[in-house]
Structure formats: structure tokens, C-alpha cells
Amino acid sequence: MTSVELRSLKDVLALDYDDIIDVRSPSEYAEDHLPGAISLPVLDDDERAKVGTIYKQVSPFDARKLGAALVAQNAARHLQGPLADRSGGWRPLVYCWRGGQRSGSFATILSQIGWRVDLVKGGYKSWRGLVVRAVYDDPVPSPVIVLDGNTGSAKTEILNRLPALGVQVIDLEGLAHHRGSLFGAMGPQPSQKESLACG
């Protein structure tokens, strides 16, 4: 089992794994995750809160003992459910928040079965750092043209036709489900993290 360090956003596209597995809680995954990752939480939201409370109010030892039991139960469910059809040559990449106990525990179980499993060094936190740097610190790699205008001036129609001409498009109003436009909210607005990852 090795740790894979992501140094750029493009590194994720070059990864040669059969699956990227996010073992964080369902709410963490829903807020944002690595592109293409599947959610196989080793602790659900309530279990994570309970373990954290015991860690702070009782003792780290008691929290780890409960956490290990819950991780084992949830890992068993994943092995008998979503992972039941994986062959011996299956090769997953696993991550959690910081690349620590949750991903390490699950990866250990998978490697003991015989799968060649690796971890994302620094976990989701390292990926998030790359996204933030790309959006706020790094120069934009190519020219950007902003299409704006009044409501009803066919901006969305123009944006929808540009990809057929080979133009990369980010429809910010579409990503925000037209919240703030004359059309009003057209569905739930994505989180800021999700929007940045799409852009």
C-alpha cells in the first residue's frame, strides 16, 4: 500500500485505478469529492459525530475502539454489497479527509484481501488545496471571454451551441440553477466547492 501525491488537478485524470473510493461520511461526499469518486463511507454522519464526541468527552482510546468496530461493520457491508463483484485484479485508490485513519483502516482491510490498494496522500484536503490554488492563485491558462447581457438575449442558447464548435464553456448561471436571475431558482444551488470543481 502506497500513498499517491496529487500535484495538479490533471493528475486525477491520469490515475490508473479501477475505482476512486471516498470513505468519508455521506454529507462530506455530497458537499464535494474527487471527480469520479464513489462513496463507500466507513462511518455515516451519525457514527462520525458519535465517535468525535466520545473522543473529546470520554477518551481517544474509547473513540478509536468504537470507530474500529463501526468501520469493520461498514466495510463488511461494502464488501458484500458494492464490492462483491470485484475480481482479484481490482485496483482501488482510497481517500478520506486527510488521508488518515478512515482511509487507512479501509485500505488495510482491502489489502488484506489481496487487492492492490493505494491512498491519496493528504486525502480530500490535499485535493481541495489544489482546486483553491488553481482558481485563486494560478494564472488562467488560456484567454477567457465573458458573455453577458440582459435576460432574454439568448446567452444560454449561444453557450449551448459553442461546445459543438470546440469551445470550452462554463455556464455559471446554469451551475447556479439561475438563482439570482429573472428565472429564479430552478433547482437546488450547488455548493461553492462543487461549483469550483466543475469550473
Image: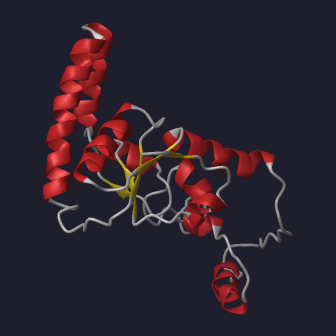
Residue at x 18% of width, y 44% of height:
74
18 versus 166 height, above or below: above
Q: Name the residue furthest top.
A: 58
The extreme bottom residue here reads 164
Q: Is residue 186 visible?
A: yes
107 left or right of 151 in image: left
The quadrant holding residue 126 is top right
Picture coordinates of residue 80 (x, y %)? 13, 57
Q: Quadrant of the C terminus?
A: bottom right
Label tally = 0
In this rendering, the answer to whether 45 lies above or below 89 is: above
Query: How are the residues colored?
Result: secondary structure
Q: Could you tell whether 100 is left or right of 158 in the image?
A: left
Determine the residue positioned at 14% across, 40% down: 73
Residue 66 x/y as whole percent: 18, 24
Q: Residue at x 78, y 73 (%)?
A: 147
Task: Point out the image quarter for the N terminus.
Answer: top left
Q: Position of residue 60 (x, y in %)?
A: 30, 13
Q: In this view of the protein, which residue sits in the foreground, 38 or 192?
A: 38
Observer-nearest of 154 and 162: 162
In the displayed structure image, the side of residue 41 where residue 153 appears, left or right: right
34 or 161, nearer to the observer: 34
Q: Which quadrant of the figure has residue 129?
A: top right
Task: Please tell me which residue is depicted at 14% across the width and 50% down the height of the picture.
Answer: 77
Residue 178 showing in the rendered view: no
Point out residue 61 in the picture as x, y percentages from the top left corner.
Answer: 26, 13
Q: Which sits in the foreground, 3 or 190?
A: 3
